[in-house]
Image (cartoon, helix red, strand yellow):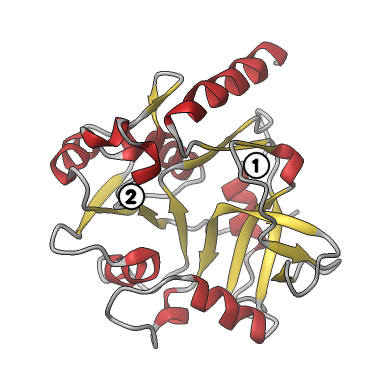
Amino acid sequence: MTIRQAPIKQAMVLAAGLGTRMRPVTDTMPKPLVRIDGKPMIDYALDALRDAGVERAVVNVHHFADQMEDHLKSYDGLEILISDERGGLMNNGGGIVKGLKLLDREPIFVMNADLFWIGEKPGMPTNLERLAGFFDPDRMDMAMLCVRIEDTTGHNGVRDFSMAPDARLTRYRDDPSNPVVYAGAFAMKPSFLDDAPTEAFNINIYFDKAIAHGRLYGMMLEGHWLTVGTPEAIGEAEDTIRRFRASV
């Protein structure tokens, strides 16, 4: 695959959720700061963006926002801007729209702060570099990183989409032929959300809009994907990371 000459330089990281399933851990801290194998979850996302050539990232904050801001000030390698949702959560769609006001009109990555992957091959393009090269705004509204269910840890087993041979995505419920899981990262042009609501809404509305126009595409993740939704899942994720480290 040819990587685009101008990599995606900006990103939005969704980090404002309450992390209710992670209680009691999140009774005293935001979920993105929960450490997995000694590293806050959000740093896996920020490191992936940095390694892909991103220079500026907006991070939205709400739950224990002061802790989030203190941590982000100390992160080295990216210019980080804060989208403050202390006044009220905007859901993922509204959070993206609010965060976009701090970025320019060039393509962006959008990532969840509590989903990450391991096992990329050293010396090869990273998953996000590959996603940037795959994204073609002439044909696509969004290019989504996807993963096979067997390459996940901590997932609830739900299949999100089905991928056609040409990499177009449809909802799994409408076509269960080739199931994939959304891996928590996508590329898009900000203009795709120009008609979005200004209040809280779910970004799934725009996934479906892209599907309706045949413009939602997926690219398969290389490596192993982890989601840590409960305190019990922390140990499972750390075991997986240790197994991958031992196999290298």
Q: Where is residue 31 in the image (x, y as percent from the top left)?
A: 33, 39
Query: Residue at position x 59%, y 18% from top?
Result: 239
Give percent across and percent down for residue 7. Answer: 52, 56
Residue 77 visible to an observer of this rendering: no
Q: How crowded is mark 1: few (under 14 residues within 10 Å), some or many (20 or more)?
A: some
Q: Residue 125 carries which label?
A: 1
Q: Could you tell me which quadrant the C terminus lies in? A: top right
218 or 237: which is nearer to us? 237
**Left or right: 60 in relation to 154:** left
Above or below, comparing residue 163 to residue 59 in the picture: below
Task: Tell me the kind of residue under disc 2.
Answer: Ala
Q: Which residue is drawn at 65% across and 51% down?
A: 130
Q: Which one is earlier in the sequence, the residue at label 1 or at label 2?
A: 2
Amino acid on which disc 1 is placed? Pro
Query: Badge 2: few (under 14), some or many (20 or more) residues near its Cα, within 10 Å?
Result: many
User: Which of the pair 158/96 is nearer the observer?
Assistant: 158
Q: Residue furthest top?
A: 246
Element carrying mark 2:
loop
The residue under the point 62% across, 23% down is: 240
Horizontal placement of 35 versus 29: left or right?
Answer: right
> Which numbered dot is residue 15?
2
